[in-house]
Image: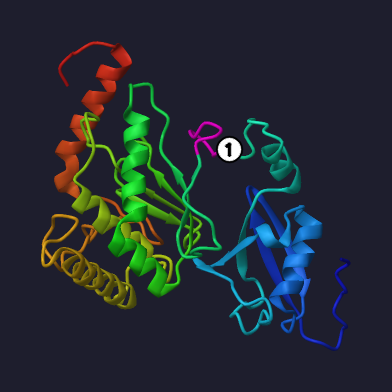
Amino acid sequence: MQQDPPSSSSPSLTLHVVNAALSSPLNLSPSTPLSALRETLEDLMSIAASNQKLLFKGRALVGDERTLEELGLRDGSRVMLLGAKREGVERVEKGDREVVRSGKGYLKPGKLRSTGTATINRYIFHNLAPLPVPAPNHSADALRYLKRLAEDPSIVRIMREHRWSVGTLGEMHPLERPELLGVNTNMGELIQLRLRTDRLDGFRAYSEVRRVLLHELTHNVYGGHGTDFKTLNSQLNREAALYDAESTAGRTLAGGRRGDTYEPIPTPDRVDHGGHRLGEREERRRRMREAAMRRMAGGGTGRG
């Protein structure tokens, strides 16, 4: 389908559609229906319209008859496109096991795990990305941890009721950016959580990590940590506690106190827009981590 350029007398908007590492600007009319955008992307990206998942500010775009303006898209809006290209789908259908997509940076090819299909529930974590590590079973353990978070009944209900869709829920590298417990990239394109302990000998308490996840989900809406952010974050934690109580007759799934919220320790150099730095009291944890790194590098059990 050829994209008709808007006339000089009609208003237009430029969308930035991101797929993998590529960003494609599209000049469209605000009255363009979502179905026409999907057809344009099918021609441009070789991703079938029926296989496309379009995310805007962490929410799935639905209603093919709705216009871009009705969906809240404005000039300069950034839309994330998820979906396998035609050639990738054909390879899978033929039984070819080669990797269709790969992760970025430290993620090895083939470690993204799909969590479901959009036809059943659009408001999910579409992929899970544990870190591949040499220690036996640890990568599998991390995948189970991420799967538990993604399938947590209270998290599932919150995602559905707030109509949030996250591209990938992944694990933060335990030795990179040690001051962060979690980060949300592009308002729901990628959420990464620190799962492993500072000693690198196991995993953090589920209740702690789930509170951080709720914090990061709040960044689907608000970039900074202002009043609106704190209000929504507190609301999500109250909702989680209520849903836990309904599911377990008063006993929380996460094992924490109802109403607990994860709050980044305020420091002058705190990171906004989805990342949070730990305060000075974490200096001891940093030293423990460095000692663990030295032990890993030396292959021995030297003291930190």
**Looking at the image, can residue 177 be seen?**
no
On screen, 175 above or below 271?
above
**Residue drawn at (35%, 46%), measured in percent from left and top?**
146
* Horizontal side, residue 86 vs residue 299: left or right: right
**Looking at the image, can residue 62 be seen?**
yes
Q: Position of residue 155 (x, y in %)?
A: 32, 62
Q: Quadrant of the C terminus?
A: top left
Which residue position is annotated with label 1?
102
Q: Quadrant of residue 90?
A: top right
On screen, 225 above or below 169?
below
Q: Position of residue 193 (x, y in %)?
A: 34, 48
- Type of amino acid at the residue the image marks with label 1: Ser
Which segment is the magenta one? 103-111
* Horizontal side, residue 33 vs residue 9: left or right: left
Q: Quadrant of the N terminus?
A: bottom right
**Residue drawn at (32%, 29%), measured in percent from left and top?**
138
* Horizontal side, residue 249 vs residue 103: left or right: left
